[in-house]
Image (cartoon, grey):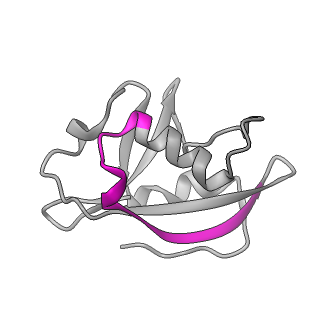
């Protein structure tokens, strides 16, 4: 998640065929942890330095019969233009925190963090 200069919070989402989903990764046989795997994907697609990211929250969600960790990262950077952070603007987008709940409706969350 990124908070811009106007103090509005946005979440990174995948865009595909007009639908949005949370970025995810299939764990590979490389031996990386779930945290390491999602960090690798995140840093490949968003122009944010790893040192400016902090793990804000971790919860468990259930979707399609699978348990999955949900990592929420917060960027210490406060850019004026969020789209300038995207390495692949057609594949990813930023959605306001108030719009993220529609993405979560199909998932069963152990707890639902609230972000403003």
In the image, is residue 107 above or below residue 91?
Answer: below
Q: Report which quarter residue 37 is drawn in.
A: top right
* Res 76 seen here: yes
The quadrant of the picture occupied by the C terminus is: bottom left
Front in this rendered view, residue 51 or 56: 51
| Residue lying farthest to the front in this orientation | 31
Residue drawn at point x = 52 percent, y = 23 percent: 17
Residue span colored magenta? 44-62
Q: Report the side of 61 relative to 54 (left or right).
A: right
> Residue 95, percent across and down?
38, 49
Residue at left 87%, top 51%?
65
User: Tag count in the figure?
Assistant: 0
Say if residue 10 shows up in the picture.
no
* Residue 11 screen position, x and y as percent: 40, 54
> Image quadrant of residue 94?
top left
Residue at the spot 38% in from the left edge and 24% down from the top edge: 90
Q: At 30% from the left edge and 49% from the top edge, which residue is drawn? A: 49
Tell me residue 99's x, y (percent): 43, 56
Q: Is residue 56 magenta?
A: yes
Q: Is residue 37 above or below residue 6?
A: above
| Residue 20: x %, y % from top left | 52, 39
Describe residue 67's horizontal placement relative to residue 48 as left or right. Answer: right
Q: Is residue 102 magenta?
A: no
In the picture, measured across the screen, residue 49 lies left or right of residue 41, that is: left
Q: Is residue 13 above or below residue 15?
A: below
* Quadrant in the picture for the N terminus: bottom left
């Amino acid at each position: 998640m990124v908070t811009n200069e106007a103090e509005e919070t946005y979440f990174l989402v995948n865009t595909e065929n007009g639908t949005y989903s949370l970025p995810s990764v299939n764990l590979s046989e490389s031996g990386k942890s779930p945290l390491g795997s999602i960090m690798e994907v995140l840093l490949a697609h968003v122009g944010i330095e790893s040192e400016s990211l902090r793990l804000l929250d971790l919860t468990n969600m259930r979707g399609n019969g699978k348990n999955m960790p949900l990592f929420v990262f917060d960027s210490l950077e406060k850019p004026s233009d969020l789209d300038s952070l995207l390495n692949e603007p057609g594949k990813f987008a930023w959605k306001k925190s108030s719009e993220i709940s529609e993405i979560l409706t199909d998932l069963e969350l152990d707890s639902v963090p609230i972000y403003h």
